[in-house]
Amino acid sequence: MNFGNDPSSASPALPAAPPELLGGAGKYRITARHIFLGVAFLLLLLAVVIPNSLPVPTAAAMGLAFFLALPGMRVDPGFRTLLALYAATVIVTVFYMVVGGMHDAPLVALAQVFAIYIASPLLWMLIAHSLLRWIGADRLIDWLALLSLLCALSVGVFFYLYLTRGAAAVAFFFKGANVNLNNGFAGATMHVYGSLIFLCGAFFSSPELIRNRLLRFALLAMLLASALTSGRSALILSVPMGWLLGLALMSRTIGNTRRSAFTQLVRYGLPMLAAAAAALFLLQAYTQINLSTVLSTVTDKVASGGGSARVQMGHSLLHGILENGGFGSGHGVGVDYVSDPIHPWRYELVWMATLYRVGIFGTLVYALPFLLYFIGVLRLAYGRRLPARHKFMFCGLVCAFLATNTNPYIEAFAFQWMYVIPLVALFIEYPDCFRKAPE
């Protein structure tokens, strides 16, 4: 499998199976590769569809996938660059863990920092590298389409069970679950909404990657319905944000550069609008949800800075940043405002919390892999060499990355797949786009 600078829109083909993998009568027998792919799919199923519901099995699946990925690991130039950037973040993390310990950070906080900032990203990187090497980004997107369908179905199951049998029936999805269906508004507490932020932004930016037209129509409609009934501003906004980003990059995407804007609109825009109209019609006809009420609530929440609690949290974190002079107070150290009584060092405003913990320099080191990723994608787009699969990954990551400003998804190991996979995919396929402009 060649991860060079091939500008084709399809993922590089997998190498032919060696003869020793063939059993009698030309049949395949189970190999380590098959076991790895099965465990990797199970890991994504747990992390994408039911994140945080089964943390121990998810961690076990991650560990097993990691060990299965090691034998066939190949450190190519692009991945070597990504590992070097990861090593820089590890140095920053270890240094500020020491600083946090000097400021009386609890040991449990430092242990969680090690797991989330050092161990988990490395495992996801190695798993993603092997997964992309074996099946390619296009096949992985097919997996994500299936998982997105399951995510949307899980939302429907959640609402049905909660409304018919109460909160105890949905404790598997979320302990202390709640549903709000008052005055035309809809909202629920589900971990899967974090996954859907990436998936909605990605699939609404690149609906053409769902090759089956019926599945494309159904999935887009289900994703939109899931977003509108979530009550989550970041998720609802990911739909128009993904669509606008995809529209802006469409003319810069391989395969679309020779098509007129009208042709692209008819082929992809109209089915998307039809799916949106169907979702809105069903919500209006069979529920009490009012679209204007939902959008008004989202607008008010965004205008208020994410709500009064986040505003107070932001003020307290800003005060802490000014007190430490931008040098950082250390990991595991909190400010006066307590967001989580059990874990008082955790905050939903990840950007500001990172600046408070590791200072300006540490924040830049943490952000560097993402900055280089964004630069690489924009370079490919500028040269009209951006594959549709990377447009998909980029738009999903932008929506998920912006959501970290108000939600700590990136600090949960079950959600780190959506921040790691796009980077690994681009670094291993286009290692040179970070050093020179594409020809």
Image (tube, helix red, strand yellow):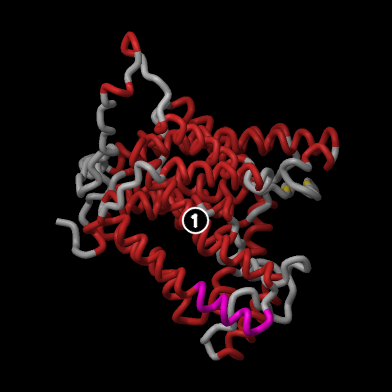
| 280 up-or-down from 376: above or below | above
Residue 334 in the image, given as x and y percentages of width and height: 68, 77
- The amino acid on which the numbered mark 1 sits, given as a three-letter code, is Cys
Q: Can residue 332 be seen in this view?
A: yes
Compared across the picture, whether 67 is left or right of 283 comes to left
Using the image as rendered, state which of residue 67 and residue 299 is in the foreground.
67
Q: Quick one: quadrant of the C terminus? A: bottom left
Which quarter of the figure has residue 101? bottom right
Q: Within the magenta stretch, is there residue 36?
A: no
In the image, residue 315 above or below residue 169: below
Number of numbered discs visible in the structure rendering? 1
Which range is magenta?
93-104
**Residue hosting label 1:** 399
For the residue labelled by badge 1, is the local secondary structure a helix, a strand or a loop?
A: helix
- Residue 268: x percent and y percent? 39, 37
Q: Does the magenta stretch include residue 94?
A: yes
Task: From the image, give the main secondary structure of the stretch colored magenta.
Answer: helix
Where is residue 345 drawn, in percent x and y?
68, 72
